[in-house]
Image (cartoon, rainbow, N blue to C red):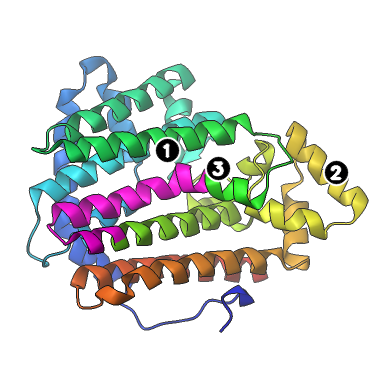
Amino acid sequence: MNARSGRTVRRPALGAGELFVRLRPHLRALDRFVRAQLDCFEPEIRAPVAYCVDVSGKRLRPSLVFLSGWRGAGRVAPPLVRAAAIVEMVHLATLVHDDIMDGAELRRSLPTAARRYGSDAAVLTGDALLAHAVHLSAQFPSSEVCRVVAAATRRVCAGEVAQTLRRGDTSITLADYRRIVDLKTAELFQLSCRLGSSLAGFEAAFVTAAAAFGRHLGIAYQIYDDLADFFGEEKQVGKTLGTDLAGGKLTLPLLMLLPKLPGAERARLLAEIRTGRKPAVGRRRAQMTELGVFGDVVGYIQDELVAANANLRPWRRLAAAGLLARLGELLRDQLDGLQHGASD
């Protein structure tokens, strides 16, 4: 089936429940490790740091660390636990900063750190999380881990800065959008897979393949997130929706919608993006459905998932490769749910 058909393809795969049952000992070890790290923070900031940890969500990036370094269900390797904590702390910091810039009220169905503690305290808490992630990476015997973590963190921040500087910019192209997504989201996905597979001792060629898988998966997840900002349900997604258009972010759904609108309506949407005033999110959602934009964007997600799995195909003999591919299936399930909601 054509990946741009707008329909997901059901494939036999390990169920999400069973996959996370396998990960349960690893994620529990991660929780214990992260909780123990709270004592490393100064008493004055432990409460906001702990709050950020409590609303951390599905732990997708740590799961990528564990699955890319999978050597057997019974083995919870301490280096992977530390690496998973590092990527989770970097991710938490970016969420705190994102919510401030987006003016978001909810994260995981709870008030954001900015709403709970104020924007000034929240941004500094995010900075402290980033600093501690680099501190943890410096504790590995080799400086390589610290090097790749620091470089990835810099690239994530660069992506956030690039997106912030281009809020309200209607000249953004598809290439511009992809560059921002590659930096702000896909970079941390590839880092997770790179750290897991490398620390587990896999050969360099598989480390490269796993990292490439992670990068494509990260792009797919960000596109999905951008689509969910219009078509998701706040109760299910657990965060404030409709912030992209209100914040002047020209994401892929809007990039696909603009050329399909008649002149006057296109001008109105461009004005919404430039000013952020009175964004007609419901109207844009209806137009995306009517003009086939939803299906177009789904096609891009499907393409990224196909490209992600292509990197793993030569490594089918490895359990790690199979489990990574199955984790990618979770996004297909989420996409199915979004499509059902859009058709209601």
* Image coords of residue 123 (percent x, y): 42, 23
Residue, x 57% and y 36% (percent of image)? 163
Question: Could you tell me which quadrant the C terminus lies in?
Answer: bottom right
> Is residue 16 within the magenta segment?
no
* Observer able to see residue 42: yes
* Image coords of residue 54 (percent x, y): 31, 39
Q: Which is nearer the eye, 44 or 254?
A: 254
Question: Could you tell me which quadrant the N terminus lies in?
Answer: bottom right
Q: Which residues are magenta?
A: 180-208
Q: Determine whether the residue tagged by mark 2 lies in a helix, strand or loop.
A: helix
The residues tagged by marks 3 and 1 sit, at their Cα atoms, a distance apart of 22 Å
**Residue on which disc 1 sits:** 156
Residue, x 55% and y 30% (percent of image)? 101
**Label 1 neighbour load within 10 Å: few <14, some 14-19, many 20+:** many
Q: Is residue 224 left or right of residue 74?
A: right
**Residue on which disc 3 sits:** 240
Residue, x 35% and y 52% (percent of image)? 190
Are the two marked residues, 3 and 1, in contact with CB atoms closer than 8 angstroms?
Answer: no
Q: Amino acid at mark 3?
A: Thr
Q: Determine whether the residue tagged by mark 1 lies in a helix, strand or loop.
A: helix
Q: Is residue 236 above or below residue 125?
A: below
Are the two marked residues, 1 and 2, in contact with CB atoms closer than 8 angstroms?
Answer: no
Find residue 268 and name its label: 2
Q: Determine whether the residue tagged by mark 3 lies in a helix, strand or loop.
A: loop
Decide which of tag 3 and tag 1 comes sooner along the chain.
Answer: 1
Are the two marked residues, 2 and 3, in contact with CB atoms closer than 8 angstroms?
Answer: no
Residue, x 73% and y 65% (percent of image)? 289
The residues tagged by marks 1 and 2 sit, at their Cα atoms, a distance apart of 32 Å
* Observer able to see residue 102: no
